[in-house]
């Protein structure tokens, strides 16, 4: 007499495959296995630490980008906001008050986030257009504020996140810890609080969210303000990585954050995905670049591979949306 167990197992497998995180995790595992076979040094603690450290700034910014994309928006200015923050920090710290510099940077980045959110919610302008405009303005303002010069930052509180420490034979920095804490805190907010449920509701179906009493405008504004806070943390981490405030730094950060979010399985149409997927997506890109570099592959071919990954991720998202209709 047959049992229904195989059918149940098939149902569980299908349900598992529908999870947005499964595909990116599988891709990450495959990439790690392939590059560990190609290079004996790929899984060395020093190289793993290097991959994580190189991912800190973009990895933190990608958390903010995830929040925006979950609401069916996109933020082209988040990298520029962080770079502006580094200039503010460096110039105020030069006057001898690094703690004030951190506080001022937080206020400035939050103000930019609130500006983006206010234009999107108050004037009902498309996030793409709003953040494209603020990106251009902030980029120019950064260069004017810096005088188109790089500003050196002295060792101290502003470079703290670049400090190394050891866990057994593994060495890392407090910047990596800060990045993981940002992911953990945002994951908790999205999955365990009413605010997180409202973010998904607004991104998935704003009309239905309004009918349920969700204040969509307030939720969107809070998301952009939170993104400003995250940009300030990224600015602090950037000075820990390299103690120079460079107005021309992280020019491609906006595109890199979008890449990590999309590869991590978050839908560009909102309401689906999360920061754990973004963390995996960011690691996929970092592992790919590091592994291909060790294999002697030109950086231009690395960009081609990354672009193909993004297109494939969007195609999978489109297919999943059609299947769920």
Image (cartoon, rainbow, N blue to C red):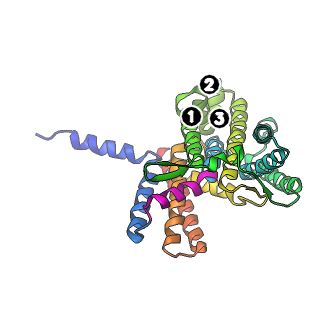
Label 1 element class: helix
In the picture, the disc for residue 19 is none
Mark 3 / mark 1, whichever is N-terminal: 1
Q: List the residue tagged with mark 2.
A: 212
Q: List the residue tagged with mark 1.
A: 190
Res 225 quadrant in image: top right
Q: List the residue tagged with mark 3.
A: 206
Q: Is residue 192 left or right of residue 103?
A: left
Measured in 3D between alpha carbons, the distance from the residue under mark 2 to the one under mark 1, in whole angstroms, is 18 Å
Residue 194 versus residue 270: which sits nearer the camera? 194
Q: Is residue 74 visible?
A: no
Q: Is residue 90 above or below residue 228?
A: below
Measured in 3D between alpha carbons, the distance from the residue under mark 2 to the one under mark 3, in whole angstroms, is 10 Å
Magenta stretch containing residue 311, yes or no? Answer: no
Q: Is residue 151 above or below residue 41?
A: above
Which residue occupies 71% across, 58% down? 250
- The main secondary structure of the magenta stretch is helix
The nearer-to-camera label among 3 and 1 is 1
Region rendered in magenta: 42-57
Label 3 element class: helix
Mark 2 / mark 1, whichever is N-terminal: 1
Which residue occupies 85% across, 55% down? 146
Label 2 element class: loop
Which residue occupies 65% across, 23% down? 213
């Amino acid at each position: 007499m047959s049992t229904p167990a195989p059918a149940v197992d098939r149902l569980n497998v299908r349900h598992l495959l529908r999870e947005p995180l499964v595909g990116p995790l599988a891709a990450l595992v495959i990439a790690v296995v392939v590059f560990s076979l190609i290079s004996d040094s790929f899984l060395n603690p020093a190289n793993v630490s290097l991959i994580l450290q190189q991912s800190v700034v973009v990895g933190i910014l990608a958390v903010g980008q995830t929040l925006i994309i979950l609401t069916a928006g996109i933020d082209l200015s988040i990298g520029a906001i962080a770079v502006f923050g580094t200039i503010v920090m460096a110039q105020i710290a030069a006057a001898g008050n690094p703690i004030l510099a951190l506080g001022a940077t937080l206020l400035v980045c939050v103000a930019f986030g609130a500006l983006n959110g206010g234009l999107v919610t108050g004037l009902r302008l498309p996030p793409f257009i709003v953040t494209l405009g603020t990106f251009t303005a902030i980029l120019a303002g950064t260069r004017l504020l810096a005088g188109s010069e790089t500003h050196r930052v002295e060792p101290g509180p502003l470079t703290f996140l670049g400090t190394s420490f050891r866990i057994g034979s593994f060495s890392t920095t407090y910047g990596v810890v800060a990045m993981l804490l940002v992911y953990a805190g945002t994951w908790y907010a999205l999955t365990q609080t009413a605010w997180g449920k409202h973010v998904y509701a607004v991104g998935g179906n704003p009309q239905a969210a309004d009918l349920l009493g969700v204040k969509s405008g307030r939720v969107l504004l809070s998301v952009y303000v939170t993104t400003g806070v995250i940009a300030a943390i990224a600015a602090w981490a950037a000075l820990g990585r390299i103690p120079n405030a460079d107005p021309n730094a992280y020019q491609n950060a906006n595109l890199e954050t979008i890449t990590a979010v999309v590869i991590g399985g978050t839908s560009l149409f909102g309401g689906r995905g999360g920061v754990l997927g973004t963390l995996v997506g960011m690691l996929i890109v970092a592992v790919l670049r590091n592994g291909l570099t060790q294999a002697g592959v030109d950086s231009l071919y690395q960009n081609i591979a990354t672009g193909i990954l993004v297109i494939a991720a969007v195609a999978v998202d489109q297919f999943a949306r059609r299947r769920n209709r």
